[in-house]
Amino acid sequence: MSDLKSEVFAALVQVIDPELRRPITELGMVGDISGETSSFEVTIKLTVSHCPQADYLEQEVTKALTTSFTQSNVLVKMSVMSQEELAELKLKLRNGKEPKSNPFIAGTATKVFLIGSGKGGVGKSSITVNVAVELAKQGFEVGVIDADIFGFSIPGQLGTSDRPTRLDDMILPPVANGVKVISIGMFLPGNEPVAWRGPMLHKAVEQFLTEVYWGNLDFLLIDMPPGTGDVAISVGQLLPTAKTIVVTTPQQAAATVAERSGTAGLKTGQEIFGVIENMSYLIQPDGTKLELFGSGGGEAVVHSLSERTGTTIELLAKIPLSISLREGSDNGKPVVLNYPEDAASSEIKKLAKLLIESKLPTSARTLKVTLT
């Protein structure tokens, strides 16, 4: 490699592809380099012609080169990879694995958590988003799957309207606030409803796992649909090393339904990691806690699941009612980023710490699904 090419590569190693999260110099995206140090041209090869990050990459490459070559006349030319180059890139991304293989089965180093509830409206999606963003903020590689096919809300709460990029049979998920995310809502026009039955639901979840390029994740969080239906069974079968987190609210009616969610996970082989009580209380101006929805729901779920499993299930967090949390979910601005000192943010940070300290997944288990 000539001195000029070496210097250009050294300058461009800092340019990270926002979808693949790796330097463009490692991805074969730096093409021809022609000219001399005083005046040269660099070709950047996009993965696809319709790459949504084309303008961003051109700007970042130009900035990196003009910063390193302050006395040079630099021209950046955008091109597209050939089919052979794209095939080579996909092979590299798969690390030699077969296409459409599930990377989260036995032997995975990714901690997978299913965040579910017995009923809707308890805030599991808001918790999923904020925990994911907090983990990413601490430097971890994090992915989120919006498995709530009928009630998808994760993209909006993460503040992204980006669409995935398709590389033939591989899907590159958008990245929002440092989190890779995929949702059925990214493939639908507007607020189109989904009216699918079991086999299509299973296929969608399977595609999210096997066709999406997740890279080397530290954490994968699954925002589960409420209840114990088709998606819960499919996810349980496809993610045998996952751990379940049950979200409830303080009132007894919600706690009773939440118990079913945790028990359903047991039937598909998932270990229960713990319980979260959301909307636990409202902090008053004088510092006292007003329990608007009663109390004891989280403890009731913990007690019931502990009895069912014969193990000690922990109450992981009691997250208070928070206007900042609600507004952040509505506006796509996670509370842990925009109001880190909020009481809800503090509890979510503690929850993230528990996930970080959790053990790596054990070997996959043979699933014995009992349908009644």
Image: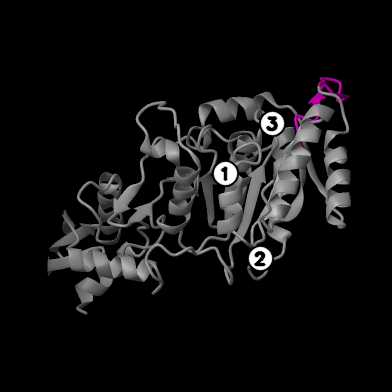
Q: Is 239 left or right of 259, judged from the image as shown?
A: left
Q: Which residue is mark 2?
A: 361
Q: Is 186 left or right of 34, judged from the image as shown?
A: right
Q: CA distance from mark 3 to mark 1?
A: 20 Å
**Which residue is drawn at the image coordinates 40% and 27% (left, top)?**
192
Q: Which residue is mark 1?
A: 230
Q: Residue furthest bottom?
A: 1
On screen, 130 above or below 44?
above
Q: Quadrant of residue 74?
A: bottom left
Q: Position of residue 324 (x, y in %)?
A: 64, 27
Q: Residues within 10 Å of mark 1 (few under 14, many from 20)?
A: some
Q: Which residue is mark 3?
A: 122
**Which residue is drawn at the image coordinates 30% and 67% (left, top)?**
89
* In this view, the mark in front (3 or 1): 1
Q: In the rendered image, is residue 354 in sight?
A: no
Q: Quadrant of residue 349?
A: top right
- Magenta range is 276-292
Q: Quadrant of the N terminus?
A: bottom left
Element marked by disc 1:
helix
